[in-house]
């Protein structure tokens, strides 16, 4: 257990004893809950296990349902702890069954989670932040800027509530992807804590093979994710030269392609299959066959697969989706050269639930996004 986790448990135990502030129970792993109940209420460790099971196996929504906990413990928890930090608001279902779930969170923000049904493998795309600071110019969420990181409990609760809301109607959720609002590795502490909760065999019991964290390329946090978890990694690549990547993904100014690829070559793959590279195809930006060849060159010595994602248009964007012919040629170029390449089907576009479409931006983009977009528009006009 890290000293950080120790501090978190000790702080929360103090808050529970004093009742000074509500404690979110889904912030804690099972081991942390055992300690928490011991430190806060002098309860034996197995009470923490029981509480963990009520939260994740039985998906209890009220302390009164937790019938194997004593009445006095339930009353103390009722006063000082919270089961669900997110308030379910509504669902928006697309004709293809992709469903956006929205939740209210503390501070008035909205968290969006997307349920994507598929034959034999339903996937939940979860958010890690309200908004995002990274300012990728093609992304709708970027136009919000960052409101705040989600807490561990708010990340985990998306999964618990989605299981409750969607599973009965649509079947089991087997895959989790951190590809919703936000850059997960910008909020790496809470994302790693949430992963430990999601994986626990006595709780939600997800397989490490079925959880994927997608990042735009925060190199130090990629290393940490590799050391502290064994879940799958996806990289939002989206360009094959530093010049283009910096134009559409400002993070590339901080960690360029060389440094990113170096970190990926060092990423521990022992327990993982391969790294996924996500590549959003943007018309006249990154969709030439030279780009396709550079994808091969960049990823040559990294066990990987390439997911090609047709750009999903959204309001006020200057970007366009390449023609079907161009995307087909791009895909064929890669597959002809034995690259594992998949064309991601667009899902949920009608309800703004598709990749890169989440969030509710205000009228104006944050200045860093506005500047990049203005430069992109100028360049497009100069090349027209
Ligand atoms: S693509 Fe991802 S990292 Fe980039 S701005 Fe959008 S949410 Fe953030």
Image (cartoon, rainbow, N blue to C red):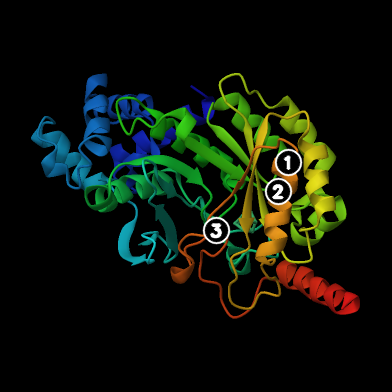
Between marks 2 and 3, how big is the CA–CA gap? Answer: 23 Å
- Please give left or right for residue 384 compared with residue 360 in the image: right
Which mark, residue 332?
2
Circle 1: element type: helix
Which residue lies under the disc numbered 1? 336
Q: Quadrant of ligand 1?
A: bottom right
Circle 2: element type: helix
Number of numbered tags placed on the structure image: 3
Q: Give the residue displayed 11% in from the left and 43% down from the top.
A: 64
- Seen from the viewer's position, the closer of residues 329 and 31 is 329
Determine if residue 7 is in view: no
* Mark 1 vs 2: CB contact within 8 A: yes
Between marks 1 and 3, how big is the CA–CA gap? Answer: 27 Å
Q: Give the residue displayed 67% in from the left and 33% down from the top.
A: 304
- Seen from the viewer's position, the closer of residues 11 and 288 is 288
Give the answer, above or below, for where 146 lies relative to 253. below
Circle 3: element type: loop
- Please give left or right for residue 108 compared with residue 325 in the image: left
Q: Quadrant of residue 286?
A: bottom right
Residue 214 image offset from top left, x and y in percent: 59, 44
């Amino acid at each position: 257990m890290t000293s950080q986790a120790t501090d978190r448990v000790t702080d929360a135990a103090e808050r529970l004893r004093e009742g000074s502030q509500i404690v979110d129970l889904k912030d804690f792993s099972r081991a942390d809950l055992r300690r928490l109940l011991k430190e806060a209420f002098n309860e034996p460790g197995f009470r923490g296990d029981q509480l963990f099971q009520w939260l994740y196996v039985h998906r209890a929504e009220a302390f009164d349902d937790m019938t194997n906990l004593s009445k006095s413990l339930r009353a103390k928890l009722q006063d000082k702890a919270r089961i669900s930090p997110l308030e379910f608001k509504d669902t928006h279902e697309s004709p293809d069954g992709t469903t956006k779930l929205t939740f209210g969170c503390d501070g008035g923000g909205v968290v969006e989670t997307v349920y994507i049904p598929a034959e034999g493998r339903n996937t939940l795309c979860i958010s890690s932040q309200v908004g995002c600071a990274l300012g990728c110019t093609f992304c709708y969420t970027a136009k919000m800027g960052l409101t705040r990181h989600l807490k561990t409990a708010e990340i985990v609760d998306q999964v618990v509530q989605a299981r409750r809301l969607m599973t009965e109607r649509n079947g089991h959720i087997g895959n989790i992807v951190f590809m919703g609002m936000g850059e997960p590795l910008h909020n790496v502490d809470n994302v790693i804590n949430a992963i430990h909760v999601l994986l626990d065999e006595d709780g939600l019991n997800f397989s490490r093979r079925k959880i994927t964290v997608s990042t735009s390329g925060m190199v130090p946090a990629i290393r940490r994710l590799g050391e502290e978890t064994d879940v799958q990694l996806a990289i939002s690549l989206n360009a094959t030269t530093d010049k283009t990547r910096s134009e559409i993904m400002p993070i590339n100014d901080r960690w360029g392609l060389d440094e990113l690829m170096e970190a990926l070559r060092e990423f521990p793959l022992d327990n993982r299959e391969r790294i996924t590279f996500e590549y959003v195809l943007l018309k006249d930006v990154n969709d030439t066959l030279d780009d396709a060849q550079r994808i091969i060159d960049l990823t040559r010595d990294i066990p990987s697969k390439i997911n090609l994602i047709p750009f999903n248009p959204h309001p006020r964007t200057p970007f366009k989706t390449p023609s079907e012919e161009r995307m087909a040629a791009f895909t064929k170029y890669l597959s002809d050269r034995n690259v594992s390449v998949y064309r991601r089907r667009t899902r949920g576009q009608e309800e703004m639930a598709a990749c890169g479409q989440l969030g509710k931006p205000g009228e104006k983009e944050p200045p860093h996004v506005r500047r990049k977009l203005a430069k992109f528009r100028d360049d497009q006009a100069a090349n027209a």
